[in-house]
Image (cartoon, grey):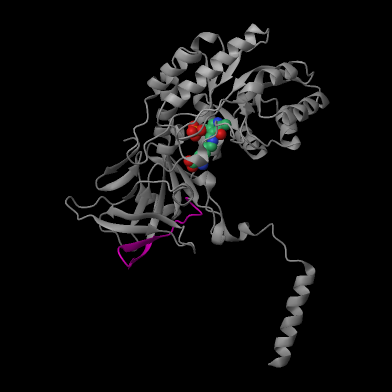
Amino acid sequence: MSGFAYINGVLHADGVALTSIADAVGTPTYVYSSTILERNYRNYEMAFGGQNLGIHFALKANSNLAVVGLLGRFGAGADIVSLGELKRALAAGIPASKIVFSGVGKTREELTAAVLAGVAQINVESEPELDVLDQVAREAGRRQRIALRVNPDVDARTHEKISTGKRGDKFGIAYNDVISVYRRAAGLAGLEPIGLALHIGSQLIDLTPYKNAYLKIAGLVQEMRGQGLSVTALDLGGGIGITYKDESPPSLEEYATIVCDTVGNLGCRLAIEPGRSIVATAGVLLSRVVYRKSGASNDILILDAGMNDLIRPSMYGAYHPIQPVVQPASGATLTEIDVVGPVCETGDTFARARLLPPLYADDLVVFGAAGAYCSSMSSTYNARPLAAEVLVQNDRFDVVRSRQKVEAMFANEHIPDWLGQIARDDETVVRKRA
Ligand code: LLP
């Protein structure tokens, strides 16, 4: 059995019952299916079959070492945006020669580490960054391959918080400035400009913005070549959107056709940086109902997972499917329930008036499509430890991140000596009074 499905009335991840994971590891726990991870990755390979395409998994979607390591085993490279992600990618076994470094605010320290590690490409987003990188590379005695990230001024028609390619967004170099910055980069001893990069947004359901952006890039490449500049690599940004509720994303074949039709004949080495569409559907967040109580209009289901574990509903108004782990009886009545977490703010609401079968304290539920931007965006707000993570392969599973110990959360905090003194003084006062 592969993926998430009911077997004998219990929801399984591949061949493992989620009830046994909850028993062994507790909740909340992220559970990932190796089968779906592999399928999602191979789908990209197949859709672009035959083309010279680099697939760099965007670690920001999920940077668990086991997840990244598994994708690396399939042949994926990595798209990283921080020193932390660089270290994670390397620790997961992704060779530096398959790592692309993106991001609008890379520090000198981060650039130095990337250059010294020998990353394949750094996508530069501004002239000041260009100068710092040139200096860093020269100091290291290297010539760093770079691409310039272009802001193509295209509306990705996605959630405003994850739209990145419009004029005025903080990302990339303005379309009209790209050629002059590229020419300048070509004259810097520490840098070897090889091409252009773009990323217009995430969770794209409509391919038209991609098409428009790629056409603009193709035009730019031709203009640059006309001016004697060498452009041999194009990084086309993140992957396509997925279905959380009722979205109908394009197929990868349709996406590949757009790529082929727009930039396929330029003779460039192409790369993409998908995150969400590789890992989202490969993961669920497993959680237990703590209480069910009656509310003003609907009953309220209070889970042991909170907005610190899964912030997307609170942050983007995102929808995640919720389903019980024990399959409801056929014909079970569905009622509208509010589903919330234990965190002390109303924003910690996963769903309002969600139609669900009967669910009560101690029942297990999962949030679907939770493999991307869920665990990687989690926090310890309310001093709640980071959830455990489990990777399933066929009928075995491994805890690939153990639940954070509460003490580990504050192990690097420190009470100043003088505060300790105040505490002792207070204690003495209290004791004297008594
Ligand atoms: N490359 C770059 C430069 C990016 O900024 C991103 C995502 C990707 C690749 C991967 O895009 P994808 O294939 O996942 O669409 N936290 C938000 C998503 C933020 C995406 C930011 N950039 C969410 O939960 O929806």
Bounds of the magenta span? 290-310
Q: Residue at x 62, y 57 (%)?
A: 408
Q: Kindly indicate the quadrant of the structure image that contains residue 49.
A: top left
Left-right relation of 78 to 138: left
Is 297 covered by the magenta stretch?
yes
Q: Kindly indicate the quadrant of the structure image that contains residue 122.
A: top right
Is 189 covered by the magenta stretch?
no
20 or 261, nearer to the observer:
261
Left-right relation of 10 to 149: left
Q: Position of residue 410 (x, y in %)?
A: 64, 60
Left-right relation of 426 to 315: right
Above-or-below relation of 239 to 416: above
For the N terminus, the quadrant is: top left
31 or 184, nearer to the observer:
184
14 or 353, nearer to the observer:
353
Q: Position of residue 357 (x, y in %)?
A: 25, 55
31 or 215, nearer to the observer:
215
Above-or-below relation of 362 to 154: below
For the C terminus, the quadrant is: bottom right
Q: Position of residue 127 (x, y in %)?
A: 72, 28
Q: Position of residue 233 (x, y in %)?
A: 60, 16
Above-or-below relation of 405 to 262: below
Left-right relation of 128 to 243: right
Q: Residue at x 43, y 59 (%)?
A: 341
**Is residue 97 something that shows in the picture?**
no
